[in-house]
Image: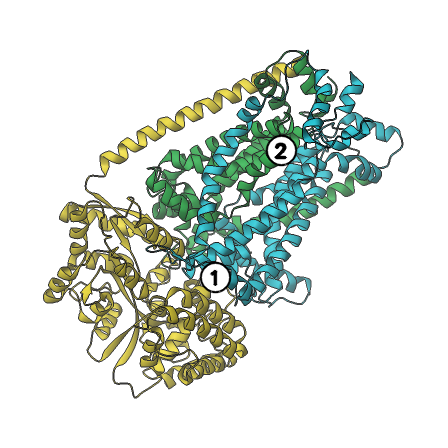
Chain colours: A yellow, B cyan, C green
Amino acid sequence: MNKSNVAFTTRRKITAIAVSFVAGAFGLTVVTTSTAQASSVTTIKLYNDKGAWDKYFTAVGNLAKKDIGVGVQPVGYTNEDTYDAIIDASFRTHSKPNVFTWHTGAQLQEIVSQKDVVSTSSIWREGIAKGDLTAGVEKYYTVGGRQYCVPLYVSYYVMYYNKNIFTKYHLSPPSTWSGLLQIAKTLKSHGVTPFYATDVLFSFLWFEQLLVGSNPTLYNNLEQGKASYLSPGVISVMKEWKTLIADGYFTNPAVTTAPQTLLKTGAVAMEPWGTWFTGNMKLVGAPPSSYGMFVIPPENTHLAKLPIIFETGPMCVPTGAPNMSADMSFLKWWTTPAPESYWASVTSDTGADPKAAAPSASIEAIDKYASSPKVQLINRYYEATPAPILNTALSEFGAFMVNPKGYMSDLKTIQAAAAQYWSSHSAS
Amino acid sequence: MQAEADRFELKAGGVRGPHLKSAGLSVPRSAHARRRLIRPFRASYRSKPQVTKPTATAGFIAPAVVVVVALMYLPFLYSVYISFTNYDGLGSPRWDGIANYVQLFHDPEMVDAIRNTAVWVVAGVVVPVALGLGLAILTYGIRHGGWYRLPFLLPYAMSGAGVAVIWGFILQPGGALGDVLKTLGLPGSGTAWLSYWPDSTIAMVIASAWQATGVNCLLFVVGLQAVPVAVLEAAEIDGARAFTKLWRVTLPLLRPMTIVVVGLAIVAALKTFDIVWVMTQGGPGYTSTTLATAMYSQTFVADSYGYGAAIAVLLTVVTGLASAVYLKQQVQVGGVKR
Amino acid sequence: MSRLGSAGLLRRAVLIVVGLVWLVPLYLLVVNAIRPSTAFTGTNEWTIPSSFGLFQNVSTAEQSSGLAGSLASTALYSIVSPGLAVVIGALVGFGVSVLQPRRPFFWFMVTFGGAVFPAQMLLVPLFVAYAQLNLYNTHQGLIIIYTALSVPLAALVLRNFFGGVPTHLFQAAQIDGASLWTTFWRIYIPVALSALVAVFILEFTFIWNDLLFGLTLASSNGVRPVMPALASLQSAYGGSTVPVVLAAGVVVSLPPVVVFLAAQRFFARGLALSQIAEL
C-alpha cells in the first residue's frame, strides 16, 4: 500500500526531526549556561523599565568596565507595570537584580519600609560635598532621614515648540501664562492647533501643569493625602482645562501618531514633555534648529518660588543583591561627572550632576534654571501619586479629555479611590 | 459481531444506562449490579486484548495532565489564595476574607467590564467563526484554494506590535478608515472610533476578527477533510443541490471541528487582553474595559493584587464553565451517522 | 470537484474581493515598513514611498535592539515546544476519546482547562517558582512553559479529531494484535497528520509571537525570544520611529509566514481521513 509507506516514511522523518531538535535543545542549553557562567564575573545585571535605552546602558557599561572594572548587562522591560510586579516579586527570591531602576514617591517609600533596598546616604553626603549632587533632588531620595538609590536621570518638564511655526507667525517663547494663552489664541486663529493633548499614559500632564502653575502647595498636599480632589482649587483647574478644550486649543486625544512626529510636521505647535523628549525629536530626524523648549510660566504670578515639574528615576541596589561591592561601586561611579556627561550626551537630556557637561546650550540653560534657589522642584504626578489612585486618575483624566463636561463625576471617582487609599495608609 | 458492535456503541462519555435500555434490558438499581450487567458485553471480546486497561490509559493521559497542572493550575491556586488577601506585591499578603469578592459586586467598573466581556463573547465568536467557516467552504477543493486562503492566514502570523500600530493608523480620527469613508462619501470620517462606547468595543472586535478568521478557516479546512468524498458523491447522485449538500451533509460532518473552533473562540474572546490594552487601556474612563483588562489594571497598575486575583478567579470560573458546557457536547465516535 | 461556470466565477470573485479588503491593513504595514525612517509624517500612510528604506530600517532596528541574537532561541522554542505539545496532545486525545477511561470528559477538561487561565495571572507565581527552582533565565524553563501553553489547544483538536474516527479502525488494530502504543503511533497519528500539522503551525506562530512569558521568565538576550527585543523599539521613552518598528515587525513575522506557506500542501485535498474509509 503506497499511501501507508509514504505515511510511514514521513512519520520516520518527523520523528527524526523531533528527536534531533530535542537533543539540540538540551545541547544548546548546556552551551549557553556554561558560557553565561563564565562571563558573569564582573558583569552586573541592570534591570530597567526603559527598554528602549538598552543601547545607552550597554554603551555606558563599556565606560564602566574601563573605569572601575564593572561591566553592565541591561535587562530591559518596556511595560512599567509588569516590570514593577516582577521586581517586587524578585525581592522574595534569590534571583535579585544587581541594580534596578525604580520610581520616587510612594513606591520608593514602600520598598524602604520593607527593607528591600540598600541605603546610599554616604554616597549622597560625598556627592553633595563635591557638588555632584544637589539638595533639591536629594529630597526625593530621602525616606525617614536616610537616602536610598542614586539618580539615573533627572528631567524637567518644559514646553517643546515648533520654531518654524513660531517664526512664521512672529511669536516668541512667553514669559507669562497670559502670554502663553495669547500665543495659543493667535495660532488658533491661523488654523494651527496650539497644544498637544497627550494620550492615556500621560493624561495627567495638563492636570498637573495647571494645578502646579496655580497652587503648588495644594498639589503637594493632594499627593500626600492632605487635600481632597474636590477642593475648590482642583475644581477650578478642571474648569479651566475644560475651557481650554472648548476653545479648541488641543489636538484630539484619540490621535495615535507619535507626538514627536506631530511636532516635527507642525500638526501641533507646542507639547509639554520631559527634557528626555529631545531624544525622541532626534529620532524622527527633526533638525535641531526646527524646535526649541521654554519653561512653562506659572499661572499664579504671586508664588514665592517658581515651580517646575521634574521627573527623576532612581537606580537602586536591592538588599542581599549578588556582587554587592561591584553594585555599590557602580552606583557611586554613576554620580561622578564623566558618566553623567556621557549619559546626558547620549540621551540629549539634563542630568543630576551640575558639574557634568550639558549636551547643548538650551539644555544647559534649563539645568541652570532648575537648580537656582528661586525655583522649587515638584515631583511628577506619576511618581507622586500612590498606585491605586494613579490607576483611577489616569482613566478618569482620559475620560475627561473625551468628555470635558463630566469633570465633576471624574473628580468624585478619583476622590473615592483616594479616600479609600488614605484611610488605610497614614497621610504622610 | 456487527450487531454486538452496534449495541456496544462507543460514546465519548462511556457506556451508560440508556444503551442498556435500547438493547432491551432493564437498568438495575445498584452500580455494582449495573457493572455486572455490562460484563456480558465485554465478555464477547474476551478473545481480544483488553481495551481499557486503566494503567495503559493513564499512561496516555498523564503527560498532558502533569504538564498542565504543574504549570497552570498551581499558579491559579496561588491566585485563588491571593484573592482572599490584601496584597500590594511587597512583603506578605494580609488575610482579608471575602472582602475582594464583596467589592466586585459594588464596583461600577465591573458593570462595564462584564457588559463588554459579554459583547466580546457574542461578537467575538460569531463573526470570526462564521467568516472562517464561509471562507473554508468557499476555498476548499478549488484549484489554488490555498492561495485564496493566504490573505486570511497572514494576519495571524503578524506580531502583535505591528498589528497594534496598524490598527492605530486605521482607527484614529482622520486615519485610514476615515480616509476611506471620505473617499466613498460616507459620514464618520472624523470620528474617533476608540473614544466612545460602543464604537470602541466594536472596532476592536473587528480588529481581532481580522486575525482570528484565518485560524478558524484553517481549522475548518482540516475538518472538511474528514467529510468522506464517497458520502458527498452519494448525495449528489441522490440529486442534492449545493445548499442541501452543505446544510445536511457537510455541516453535520464538520461538527467535531465546529466544536473545536467555537470552543476556542469562546475562550479567546473571554481572555482578550492585548488588543484592548494596547488600543484603549480599557478607557476612556472604563468604557471599553473587559474582565481581563480590569484584572490586569487592578493587579499591575493599581497594585491591588488581591482584588485583581478575585477578578481573575471570576474570569477563570466563567471561562471554564462556558467552555465545559459547550464542549460537553458528545462527539459521535461512529463517524458517519446512520 | 470544482466546477467552473457562473457559480465558480462568482465564488472566485467574492474570494478575491474579500481577500483584497483583508489585505489592506497588511498593505499599510508593508508600505510603511519600506518607508525611510524619517519620511513618515503621520498623514502619509497610504502613499508608496519614493525610496526603499526597508533594509536601512531593519538594520536600525537590529542596532537598537539586538534582534538577531534572539532569533535562534525563538526558533528553538517555536519548534520544540509545539512539537512536544502536539505529541502530548495527541496522547491525551487518543486516551480520552479512543480508549475508554472512566470520566473521559473530566480528564479532557482538566487538560483543556489550562487554556482558560489568563496569561497575566500566571506571570508572577511562575516567576517566583522559576526563580526558586533555578529555571529562571534558562532555555529549559521557557521550553517547559511554552509546551504547557500549547498542550490545551492540541488536546482539544485531537480529542475531537480522534473522536470522529470510525471505531472499526481501532477494533481492526486490536484484532490484529497491535499494542496500544503501536495503534496510536502507527495508525492514529498518520491519520491525524493534517490536524497535527495545523495545530503545530498555529502553535509555532503563537509561541514565536509570545512577548509576556519571554519577557518575564528570562533576562539575557540569548535566552529571551525575539518579541521582547522588538517591544523595546516601541516606547514613549525613545523607542524608534514607526517605519523602523514596522520593518522589524515584518521581518520578524517572516518565519511564521514561511511556515504557513510551506504547510499549505498538507491541506491540499487528498491527505484525508476519507481515504481511511476506503480501507
Residue C133 image position (x, y, % from top left): 34, 37
**Quick one: SS at disc 1?**
helix
Q: Chain of mark 1?
A: B
Q: Which residue is mark 1?
A: B99
C231, A159: nearer the viewer: C231
- Image mark for residue C103: 2
Q: Amino acid at mark 2?
A: Arg
Q: Amino acid at mark 1?
A: Ala
Give the residue drawn at x 79%, y 18%: B2
Q: Is residue B200 above or below residue B337?
A: below
Quarter of the figure with residue B91: bottom left
Judge left or right: residue C239 versus residue A409. Answer: left
**Quick one: SS at disc 2?**
loop
Give the residue drawn at x 25%, y 77%: A376
Q: Looking at the rendering, in which quadrant would you find the N terminus of chain A?
A: top right
Task: Count neighbours of disc 1 (C-alpha within 10 A) and say few if under 14, some if 14 to 19, many if 20 or more.
Answer: some
Q: How many numbered discs sit on the rendered protein? A: 2
Is residue B151 visible from the viewing direction of this image?
no
Task: Count neighbours of disc 2 (C-alpha within 10 A) and say few if under 14, some if 14 to 19, many if 20 or more.
Answer: few
